[in-house]
Amino acid sequence: MESQNKAGLPAMDGFERRAASQSYGARTCDLLVRVLALVLTLAAAIVLGVDKQTKVVPIKLVDTLPAISLPVSAKWHYLSAFTYSVASNAIASSYAALSLVLATSGKKGVVSAVIILDLLMVAMLFSSNGAALAIGLMGYQGNSHVMWAKVCTVFGRFCNQVAVSIALSLLGSILFLLLVAMRLHKKSK
């Protein structure tokens, strides 16, 4: 007959207690990392999704005439790489919210599906970060070979918000990568 503690639960030896506490700690860590990934990817999508700036820029059409001042806008949806970044971060944050529920399930099929979906989020976020970073650098540095001027000298706030969004998204993608590594490490034991 099993001995019972004061709460009426079966008594555990030291090894079982350690295993149970490690499992609880791993589950808590997993949930915490998922919440952080949710917050970071949601913040990245919002920061870039509301990014727009309008400046009055002097444009000289003919050297003999004075420059004409025209309002010019920079908006995130003008560039497909930024649209992809907003969509990827929105998808990743939605998945992170859903995975908070799925991750608590102990079913083997659900755990495998979560690992695969975590990997898809890593791939999607890293690819959107690369695309947004490439376009962001083009705006920051320009390209003398094709005579594209620097845009960030005019639209500084716009470029700063792009940089913050890329940084937040990169941190979110690293957290998803950490989730995959934690799950695979847990499975290998």
Image (tube, helix red, strand yellow):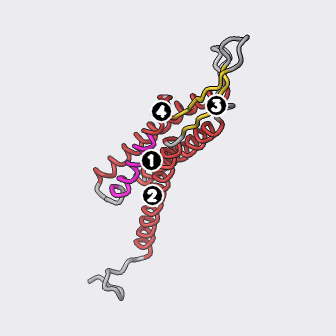
The reply to whether callout 4 and callout 2 are in contact (CB within 8 Å) is no
Vertical comparison of 116 with 60: above or below: below
Residue 142: x percent and y percent? 66, 23
Characterize the local packing of mark 4: few (<14), some (14-19) or many (20 or more) Cα atoms within 10 angstroms: some
C-beta proximity under 8 Å, tags 1 and 2: no
Where disc 3 sits, the SS reads strand
Quarter of the C terminus within the rendering = bottom left
Which residue is located at x 42 percent, y 38 percent? 87
Give, as a three-letter code, the residue at label 3: Val
Position above or below: 9 against 117: below
Callout 2, which amino acid? Answer: Asp
| Residue position marked by numbered label 1 in the rendering | 180
Can you identify the residue that label 4 sits on? 77
Q: Which contiguous range is marked in magenta?
A: 88-102
Residue that label 2 marks: 30
Return the x and y of residue 68 as percentages of the image width and height. Answer: 65, 22
- Return the x and y of residue 82 as percentages of the image width and height: 50, 34
Q: Amino acid at mark 4?
A: His
- Could you tell me how far apart the alpha carbons at marks 1 and 2 are, in whole angstroms? 10 Å
Tell me which label, 1 or 3, sits earlier in the chain. Answer: 3
The disc at residue 56 is 3
Of the numbered discs 4 and 1, the one sitting upstream in the chain is 4
Residue at (49, 46) in percent of width and height: 46
Between circles 4 and 2, the one closer to the viewer is 4
Label 1 and label 3: CA atoms lie apart by: 47 Å
Distance in Å between CA atoms under marks 2 and 3: 49 Å
- Compared to residue 80, the image places residue 35 above or below, namely below
